[in-house]
Amino acid sequence: MTSEQTSEIPFPRSKVMQQSPQLSKGALTRLLIGMCLLPIVTITVLFMILDPAAEGTLDCKFAAVGLPDADFYAIKYWERDEYSGGDLIVSNLEEVDWTHLNIQINGHYQVYDQEPIPAGSSKTFKLERFVTRAGSKFSLRYNELKSARIYARRATRDRAIYYCEFKNGEPVEVDH
């Protein structure tokens, strides 16, 4: 057979294919447009109906103890001695307990704690306890403490947050 003869033979359709419903080009176009518009319309309606979500701000204080001095970080990291220790102290300055804690340092390392921090008390977390999602542990030999953030649930069941940065081991308030 030549190529001209093969192009004249129509594609044979099976019985199942013959019995299945067929969409015209116009119907397919309308279906695709509807599939694209439906999520946009749904999200727009939800934004108009629902109240805006807002997180509260915790009345909190961070403190770091046992950190190396600035001269330690002036040395190239591969020449630094191993450094163990370092604690992050989280103080609850509110009149309600905090539960379901998620504490993050440097934006990548975090620790979850189910134990509450009672009102007016503090809790100490070892910096070596903080890990990334990939499982890498925080090490003061390679990382200087630059920031800390805490997410907590209060007794009123709302979520609240507190964030601060560290300069030379001392906490610095950040305006939001």
Image (cartoon, rainbow, N blue to C red):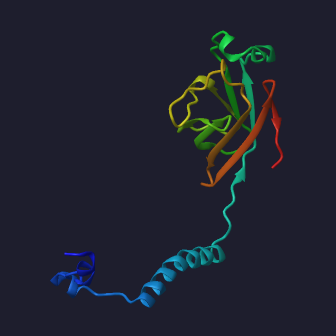
Q: Quadrant of the image for the N terminus?
A: bottom left
Q: Nearer the viewer, residue 95 or 32?
A: 32
Q: Residue at x 77, y 35 (%)?
A: 165
User: Can you give x and y, in whole percent of width and height, for residue 77 in the image?
Assistant: 68, 17
Q: Nearer the viewer, residue 70 or 166?
A: 70
Q: Does residue 23 appear to the left or right of 20 in the view shown?
A: right
Q: Residue at x 31, y 87 (%)?
A: 22
Total marks shown come to 0
The answer to whether 129 is drawn above or below residue 97 in the figure is: above
**Residue 149 visible to an observer of this rendering:** yes
User: Can you give x and y, in whole percent of width and height, for residue 56 in the image?
Assistant: 71, 53
Please identify the residue farthest to the left as the structure is shown.
15
User: Can you give x and y, in whole percent of width and height, for residue 76 in the image?
Assistant: 72, 16
The answer to whether 29 is drawn above or below residue 59 in the figure is: below
Q: Residue at x 56, y 31 (%)?
A: 131
Q: Nearer the viewer, residue 16 or 165?
A: 16
